[in-house]
Image (cartoon, coloured by chain):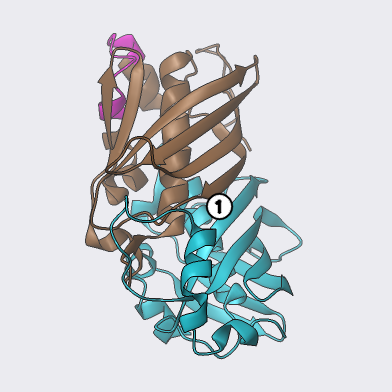
Chain colours: A cyan, B brown
Amino acid sequence: MNDHLSHIAHAGALGLRYHDSGEDFVELALPYDEHLVGDPDTGVIHGGAITALLDNAAGFAGRPPRTTMAEIAIATLDLRIDYMGPATPGRTVIGRATCYHRTRSITFVRAVAYHDSPDDPIATGTATFMTGTPNAPRPLPGSESNGGDRAGDRGSANRGTDDRGAA
Amino acid sequence: MKFLIELREQGRANDLAALLEYIPYARFLGLCVHQLGDEIITELPAAPHLTGNPNLPAVHGGVVGAMLEMTAILKLLHDTDCERLPKTVDVSFNYLRPVRADHSTYGRATVTRQGRRVANVRCDLWQAERAKTVATSHGHFVLAPLVADEPGPARET
């Protein structure tokens, strides 16, 4: 898991760490840091940092089993975040993500950000990801269209990994 | 927000660049803002620490989300007299194209509906071509009370 994180420059810049995982969830931790602060008067971290935490945790939970970042890209299609209340200044925020449905190319994930218990959330989110696209350098914008077309164009070159997500 | 009140007292209510400089998370991202009359354009210059997928390379989805949220908040600060940062209730992000990590990203917000307490804001981001939207968002924000000297709670949800 930390190997996955080390591929993601922004995860390192934020200070994200692996926290826990289980049968049906993945947790990342976002330790409090001055550079995350969104309101200097209160010291509360910015909503954007919570968004990044939940996006990242959801991406891990949504990854098809036994695939690596080098093989398969995870593209976020849609992410919705509801903010219930401010994070407490000085405290680590945990982001827990659960994949609740998977099709051949689309993954549906729920996520929650909390301090002590997922039942007392700072924010909740839902995300859908497109999976199964080989992770390779893409042409510059202008020569490509939207994500759906890309999957269609390249899915066949996918070494069978498209099917793995269908389980 | 103390700084916001100071800016307003100095007659620099619309100095959004000064405000961004005051927010540590905006400095961390490297976000800047251009004001062309009442048009507010945010810019996120390409930087290595914003990368989420090194293979494309693409900007991290969380950074894209943060930029959309910031763009909405700056637009609300510009358009209203609120003296605290608007608070995000919910945002829905749509990722339409890969956001290239080797190119600047630009953002613009539209206030779809502004009530007394809650504003509904849409944003979109683009890179090299204005017509090719790379990401959009749609969110609700609670606007802070308009009365400056009323002692409010230190922190409010």
Q: Nearer the viewer, residue A44 or A166?
A: A166
A104 is higher (above) or lower (below) than A31: below
**Amino acid of disc 1:** Thr
Q: Is residue B12 left or right of residue B84?
A: left
Residue B25 belongs to the span the image colors magenta: no
Q: Is residue B7 left or right of residue B143?
A: left
Q: Nearer the viewer, residue A61 or A22?
A: A61
Residue A143 image-quadrant placement: bottom left
Q: What residue do we see at 58% from left, 65% from top?
A: A129
Q: Is residue A42 visible?
A: no
* Magenta stretch, residue numbers: B8-19
Image location (x, y in percent) of residue B38: 35, 13
| Secondary structure state at the residue bearing disc 1 | loop
Q: What residue do we see at 56% from left, 72% from top?
A: A131
Q: How many marks?
A: 1
The residue wearing badge 1 is A88
Image location (x, y in percent) of residue A3: 40, 86
Q: What residue do we see at 40% from left, 47% from top?
A: A37
Task: Say few, some or many: other residues with alpha carbon within 10 Å of mark 1 (under 14 / 14 to 19 / 20 or more).
Answer: some
